[in-house]
Image (cartoon, rainbow, N blue to C red):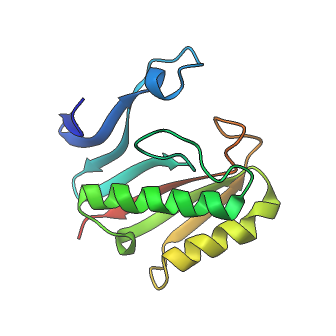
Amino acid sequence: MSNRITVGGHIRVRPFNTADTYPEQNLGNDLAQAVIAGHTIYLRGQVAQDLETRENVAIGDAAGQAAKVMDNIETLLAECGARLEHVVSCHVYLTDIRHREPVYRVLGERMPGVHPVFTGLVVQALARPEWLVEVTATAVLP
């Protein structure tokens, strides 16, 4: 499948089907890792999973997972024509409040001087039990 498609006038970056991502689940949703709508980039929630191989990384390590999340966000933004400095908003989902400090430390180190708005949420679980953190991001094209 192509790395980009246009649907509804918006560009879908890295389209995929959940049947490929979650083969153990009975799902078949057509999604994308990113959508460019006008000058706004919306990123799918990113977790500590390699974008190419779907391999989970940094199992049990919240800071390590946050680093992979930021790698994924940076990669997707670049594919959309933006950089981390163009991020305006993030939603941070944690499975344990004790992960907040190590995760936010990594996010802050990766986006110094950017000043996006963050919303932090503690949730009971993410889509896979090994995932400790998930981050969505919205950015504006330069």
Viewer-nearest residue: 50 or 115: 50
Q: Residue at x 46, y 20 (%)?
A: 19
Q: Residue at x 57, y 77 (%)?
A: 108
Task: Tell me if 28 is positioned left or right of 86 in this view.
Answer: right
Viewer-nearest residue: 85 or 60: 60
Q: Position of residue 137 (x, y in %)?
A: 46, 58
- Quadrant of residue 78 within the rendered picture: bottom left
- Residue 51 lies, with reference to residue 102, above or below; the image says above
Q: Position of residue 99 (x, y in %)?
A: 76, 62
- Quadrant of residue 20 within the rendered picture: top left
Q: Position of residue 40 (x, y in %)?
A: 30, 57
- Residue 55 lies, with reference to residue 17, above or below; the image says below
Q: Position of residue 7 (x, y in %)?
A: 21, 33
Task: Tell me if 55 is positioned left or right of 84 in this view.
Answer: right
Q: Residue at x 53, y 41 (%)?
A: 55
Q: Which image quadrant: the C terminus?
A: bottom left
